[in-house]
Amino acid sequence: MEKLSKSQEDYLEEIYVQVLESGVAKVTDISRALNVKKASVTSALIQLSAKGLINYAPYSAVTLTQSGEKLAKKILSKHKVLNELFSGILKLDDAAEIACALEHLISDKNLDKINKFVAKFSNK
């Protein structure tokens, strides 16, 4: 599968969070959470659906496909590890924003190293 854009990853992550919370995601809720227009959400949902990552039909709730859920879990995991590093360990003021920006750039190999560091630091 081709790499997702930062925006597409953000949408997929938000859909996953909403599905975890309420079983489905809705255009209005995604729009509100990401502070974007509903038309932008609809466009993104069409793209993610075409990639086989979500189940979407107009005026219906959004759910994740198996591959979409797997990818969304990975994105959210990156976000959580980076947020723990920047917020919990380094105590940066803008930790959430930094974590969100870097989650799209960091390789799995480097994330594993950061994850090990965070785990060691958290155990002390």
Image (tube, rainbow, N blue to C red):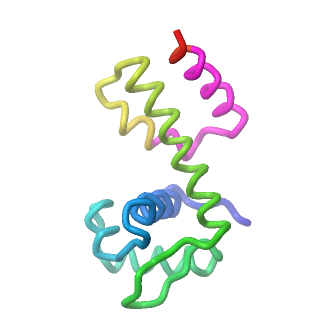
**From what the image shows, is residue 38 above or below residue 100?**
below
What secondary structure is the magenta-colored segment mainly? helix
User: Could you tell me residue 27's position as x and y percent?
Assistant: 35, 76
- Residue stretch in magenta: 101-120
**From what the image shows, is residue 118 above or below residue 111?**
above
Residue in the foreground of this view, choosing between 27 and 5:
27
Could you tell whether 116 is left or right of 17 in the image?
right
User: Could you tell me residue 21's position as x and y percent?
Assistant: 38, 60
Residue 117 located within the stretch drawn in magenta: yes
User: Could you tell me residue 36's position as x and y percent?
Assistant: 30, 66
Residue 70 located within the stretch drawn in magenta: no
User: Could you tell me residue 50's position as x and y percent?
Assistant: 61, 81
At 26% from the left and 65% from the top, the residue drawn is 32
Furthest residue in direction bottom, as rendered: 58
Specify the quadrant of the image occupied by residue 91: top left
Specify the quadrant of the image occupied by residue 28: bottom left
At 55% from the left and 80% from the top, the residue drawn is 55
- Which image quarter is the N terminus in? bottom right
